[in-house]
Structure formats: structure tokens, C-alpha cells
Amino acid sequence: VIGNYYALKGDHPKAVAYFKRAVKLDYTFLPAWTLMGHEYLEMKIIPAAIESYRTAVDIDSNDYRAWYGLGQTYEILQIYNFAIYYFINAAKAKPNDSRMWTAIGLCYEKLDKKMEAIQCYEKANSCNDREGIALYKMAKLYMEIDDYDKAAICFKENLNRNLNEDIDTDEM
């Protein structure tokens, strides 16, 4: 709890200190390892973040947060093949979360694998992409591969979605 308090205040070193205390009391306390990884990532101490996330994954291989954190670390390092591997494991642990599929798609884009990226964005869109990233990214990629009909469909669907969200917001 105290680690979370300092994390929310932006005092990442103190947050790490309290998460370390928590894992000294219980080495298998998964949330502390994952949150410690987040804090190290915030401080740009990538090796420590990787170690924390890997420990969390060793404790529970179904912890999508730790897998996603590992993906983020390798994405920051621009080692996109590794990032994809970890994001895929996050998606296996939480297959209906659009954020996992969007992250994979972004990495495929960085590797110039447009069709793979499109497939990931399609999956993200089918998983109710609340951030609205997938449709726009798909439209841009379809334009890049000269499939203007599919690009137009995606742009139109994205526009309709944004208009509907504006209407929903105005009614509140």
C-alpha cells in the first residue's frame, strides 16, 4: 500500500523501496514484483525492470501485466521481435484485451510487417478497442498498401465511432 502511495506521488525510488520490503516478507507476492517493474520502467532502469517482470512471470505465467511490462521494456529498447514475443504472451493471458493486440500491431509496424500489423489491429478492433487506435492504424496501413477501399471503410467506421462517442458524451 505504501509503495502504491509513493508511486502515485511520483516518488519512484521510495515506491521501489517499499515494494522491495514487500517481497522480502513474501517472495511470491506477485503484485509487488510487477509494480516494482513499473517503477523501474518509470525511472528508465531497464535491467531492473526486466528482472522484476521476469520474477513476476516466473511466479505466475498467466500475469498479463508482467508480460506486458516486459513487452514495453523491449519496445523501449527497440528490440521489437522480443517485444512481440512478450506482448503475445500478454495477449494469451488476456486475449480479449485490445491493448495487447494494439501493442503487437505497433511492433509489427516498426518491423514494416504491415499485414501482420493489420491482423493485430483487426483483432484489437474486434475486442472493443476503447482507445480507438486500431481502426485508424488499419486505415493508414491499408492506404500504404494501396487498398483504398478497405482504408475508406476503416476511416468511415472510425469517424462514425467518434461521432457516436461525442453524442453519448453530450447526452450526459
Image: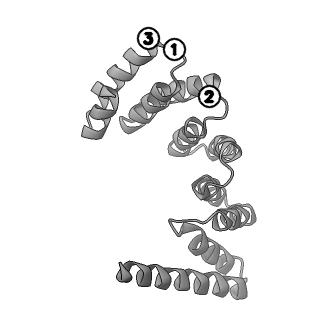
Helix, strand or loop at label 1? It is loop
Q: Quadrant of residue 70?
A: top right
Instruction: Specify few, some or many for label 3: CA neighbours under 10 Å numbering under 14, 14-19, or 20 or more.
Output: few
Helix, strand or loop at label 3? It is helix
The amino acid beneath tag 3 is Lys
Q: Is residue 135 above or below residue 42?
A: below
Q: Label 2 belongs to which residue?
A: 57
Quadrant location, the N terminus: top left
Q: Label 3 belongs to which residue?
A: 24
Instruction: Specify few, some or many for label 1: CA neighbours under 10 Å numbering under 14, 14-19, or 20 or more.
Output: some
**Mark closer to the observer (1, 2):** 1
- Which of the numbered marks, if any, corresponds to residue 27? 1
* Residue lying furthest front: 172
Left or right, 7 with respect to 79, comes to left
The residue lying at 34 percent from left, 33 percent from top is 4
Label total for image: 3
| First in residue order: circle 3 vs circle 2 | 3
Could you say where residue 155 lies in the image, as x and y percent from the top left?
Answer: 59, 83
**160 and 71: which one is in front?**
160
The residue lying at 55 percent from left, 45 percent from top is 75
Could you say where residue 31 lies in the image, as x and y percent from the top left?
Answer: 48, 29
The amino acid beneath tag 1 is Tyr
Cα distance, mark 1 to mark 3? 6 Å
The amino acid beneath tag 2 is Val
Label 1–label 3 contact, CB within 8 A: yes
Q: Is residue 13 above or below residue 161?
A: above
Helix, strand or loop at label 2? It is helix
